[in-house]
Each structure stands twice: as C-alpha cells, then as structure tokens.
Image (cartoon, grey):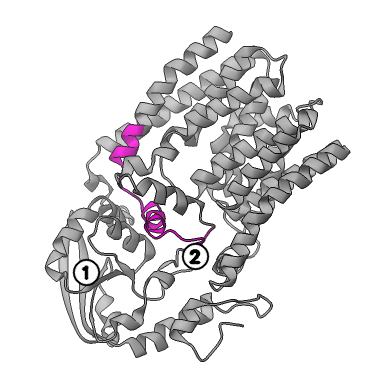
Amino acid sequence: MSSSAKRLFLALLPLTLAFRLWLGWALPVTGDEAYFVDWGRHPDWGFYDHPPMVGWWLAAQLLLGDAPVWLRLSSILQPALLAGAVAWMLPRLAPTADPARAWWAALLVLLAPVNVWNVAVTTDTPLIYFSVLAALAWLRATRDDHRGWYLAAGLMLAGAVLSKYFAALLGFAFLVHALSLRRRQVFLGLAIAYACTLPALALMAWWNAGHCWVNVMFNFINRHEGAGLNAVTLPLYLVSLLYVVTPPALWLWWKTRAVKGQMSGLWLIAAVPFALFAVMALAKTIGLHWLLGFVPLVLLWLALRLPETTLAKLGSFFIGFAALHVAIVAAIAALPMETWKSNKLYDGIVLTFEAEALVERLRPFADYAWASDGYSNAATLSFRSPQRFMVFGEGSYHARQDDFATDWRMHDGGNILILTKRRDAASEYARFFHEVELKTIELRGVSFTVVLGRGFDYARYRDEVLARVRSRYYALPAWLPQRACGFCERYFPDSACTR
C-alpha cells in the first residue's frame, strides 16, 4: 500500500506541475491579479482592501521580472508544497501511523479540485500558506505542549493576519481547541501564539489610523451595506464546500467526526471555520477561495482515519476528478474566443485577453492621461501599458486603491482618455470636460468606446463624484481615532471624514 501511494504521488507530481505551469503561462493576467501587482509596484505598509502581504511578495518578485508565470509561481507551486508539508507533518502528529498514509495525504492535497486549476496569485495565496502551516504547527505543539511549535504556530498566524483579516477564524479555532483540551500548558501556548500576532495587528492599526481606516471600512462596513438574510447564499456556500472538498471526502470527514483521541483537534480546527462561514452565509456570499486554507486539514484527517482500502478508493476518485478538470480546461483552451460571443461577459473576456492590443491602439493618444471606468479594467490595462490607467468615476466598494494613487487636482484643465465598454459614456462624462470626442475600437467583435476628454473640470468632478465617494466610502465612525486621511485632506480639507 505504501509503495502504491508513493508511486502515484511521484508520478502525478510532475504532471500536475507541468499542467499548472502551462496554465500559468497561457492565461492572461486577471483584473484582480493585475490590481495586486500594482500593489507590488508601489509597496507600502498597507493597502486599501486588505493587509499588505501579497503586495510585499509581488514587490520582491517584480525585482526579477513581471512575466505572468513568474508572478504566479507561488500559487503554481502551492499544491505541491502544501502536499509536502502535510506529508512531512503526518508522522510527527501520529508516529505510529503507516507511512503509506503520509503519501495518501500528499496525493489528496495535490489533487484537491481547486488545486488542479487555480494558478492565480491573490491575497489568498499567502493566506493559504500561512493558515495551513499555522494549523500544522499548532497541532504539533498541542501533541506534547512544545513551546517552540507554539511559537511557530504564532508566527505563521501572524503571517496569515498580514494576508487577510479572516485569519481570525483560524485563531478562534485554536481557542476552541484549547478549550476542548483544558490543559494549562495549552492555554499558555495559545497565549504565545496570540502574542506573536500583536505586532502585525499593531502595524495594521497604526497604518489604518493614518489612511482613513480603509481596511475597516471595506471589510466590516461598506461591503456589508444592505446585507440581510438571503435564501440563496447558504445553499451556494454548501455547494462550494461540496466542490472544494468533494462530496465523498466531505461525507467521510463528517462520518468520522466522532473518533476520539489525540487527533480530534485536527477535525475541530477545520470544522470551526466551516461552521462560522455557514453562519456568515445566512446573509452574504462566501467566496470559494475563502475555504481553501482549511481543505488540507480535512484531507489530512481522512488520511489518518480512513481504512486503507477506503483511502485508496478516495485517492482513485481524486485522480479521476482531477483528470476531468484537466480535460475540461484543455477543451476550453482549444475553443476560439468567439465561441463565447453570446455570453454577456464576452467584452470583458476580450479586454482581458487582448489588453496589449487595446493599449497599442491607444498609443497615438500618449499625451492624454489614461483611465477606465472600473478597477478591473484599469488594472488589467495598466499591466500591459506604458502608463497607468486611473479609475474614472465613482467605482464600487471593491478595490479602491486608486483613491490613494491618483490625485485628480493634478489633472485640472488637462486631457484624459477614458476607455470603456459602454456606448453611452459620452453623455455621462461630457459634463466633466470642456470638449469631448468619441472614437471606437473594434476588436474581436466588441466595440470599445474611447472618450477623449479635453479640459478636465476638476471642481465639478470633486463636487459630483468625489463628494459621493467621500459620503459613501469615507464616512468614518467618530469613535475611530484618526492620525490622517489623505483622501479627505486632499479634496475636502475643510470638512472631516466622519459620519
């Protein structure tokens, strides 16, 4: 059994890596990826939406190049590296376990559905690394109350906190596990782990206090406006959970939940975040990617608890399901882009795949400042452009880093080019310029509108657009202590950004 699992893993490892390297090379950079690459081009202690970790990673990678496959390398290698971490840790958590179980654990993690195809680098990429490593270190620490491992768990948890705020769910899972063990040394270890996160939390509090508390506004206020009980979001979450874990693995994980012993904490540390996500799903959509940091823990549990014959069957299912994913991706890649022409997202697909061609068509207007009407389009075009695209208009609550990067005062009276997929753009934008000219770019059956605005009226833009932005996204609760808020100080120096 051991040699069989080992052979399978060693055979599939290069195949999956080759597929993921090809996918990372073939796929164009998505809007979200390009947005985070822009963070890397302008590294800071924090950014509008999330803590800074992915920006720091990309800043380091950009020192050596900006090829998409290179920038995605941390994501491309993630399944293989996490599979190795899980396999290495398994005998340290259960020294008497059959060595075959470590290979099965590695195989399951390597072939988990999202691990087959997800090569995008986002804030979740470092979060998944840190979350899995923190959980493994915590489990090793609680096995014999090893303070070094508690310290390692805390350092990894701090990295998760600097990646995304819902790392707090993992910290809460540690607390629940400690309460279930009720040992003095575990509570001391929990204190060590929590203490490690304090510098990260202090850094984010300090940075946010000097930047309009944008992380707090985005993650805890603006994105939840209008939220309420929703009949769709919980079923959607359950479907997502079924997919990322797979139905047979999820059923087996639930079926074995009552097993007692030293490894019961492993089941609990995945269950607590999943349960909290279920509560959140009563009112909001839970992103598929939010779940990925906890899936390896489920698979490690199964590798430890299932009978070897059942484990072999589950491994076979994962191999078949992974092959199906590869076949679907290959089939889609072979289709011409025009296949999706009837899809309402087709114009966005063309913009993403043909960003470089679009930018080339704009070169005659290099004396204009360039902009688009949404963060995704602006970020995608900026990645392929000699000059950065600003976000013109109010935008959405997502991805407002442009509020920091662009100073509209500097464009007063100047010329701005706005590339948009909307044909009615002239009527909306004309009032902000003394003169407007429209041009059209036809590309793969999509008409892109180029608005050439001459004589930008900053005062009107501030009063009609930036004022709405301030009232909607920068109306800070009075109880938040502010060191500075550049957006309000820049455009509205005579009035504070408070509710």
**Disc 1 to disc 2: CB gap under 8 Å:** no
- Segment colored magenta: 21-50
Could you tell me the amino acid type at mark 1? Thr
Q: Which residue is mark 1?
A: 449
Residue at left 68%, top 55%?
Answer: 198
Residue 290 image position (x, y, % from top left): 56, 47
Residue 147 placement, left or right of 119: right
Residue at the spot of label 2: 48
Left or right of 349? Residue 148 is right
**Mark 2 is on which residue type?**
Tyr
Find numbered disc 1 in the image and state the secondary structure of the residue it sits on. Answer: strand
Q: Position of residue 180 (x, y in %)?
A: 84, 38
Identify the residue at image location x=31%, y=57%: 380
Out of 169 and 282, give the one closest to the viewer: 169
Along the line of sight, which residue is nearer the eye, 229 or 481?
481
Give the quadrant of the N terminus.
top right
Membership of 150 in magenta stretch: no
At 53% across and 77% down in the image, what residue appears?
485
Give above or below for 457 relative to 325. Answer: below
Query: Residue 247: which quarter of the image?
Result: top right
Query: Which of 117/380 is in front?
Result: 380
Quadrant of the rendered image containing residue 363: bottom left
Residue 465 in sight here: yes
Check disc 1: other Cα within 10 Å, few if <14, some if 14-19, many if 20+: many
Q: Label 1 to label 2, Cα distance in Å?
A: 29 Å
Mark 1 or mark 2, earlier in chain: 2
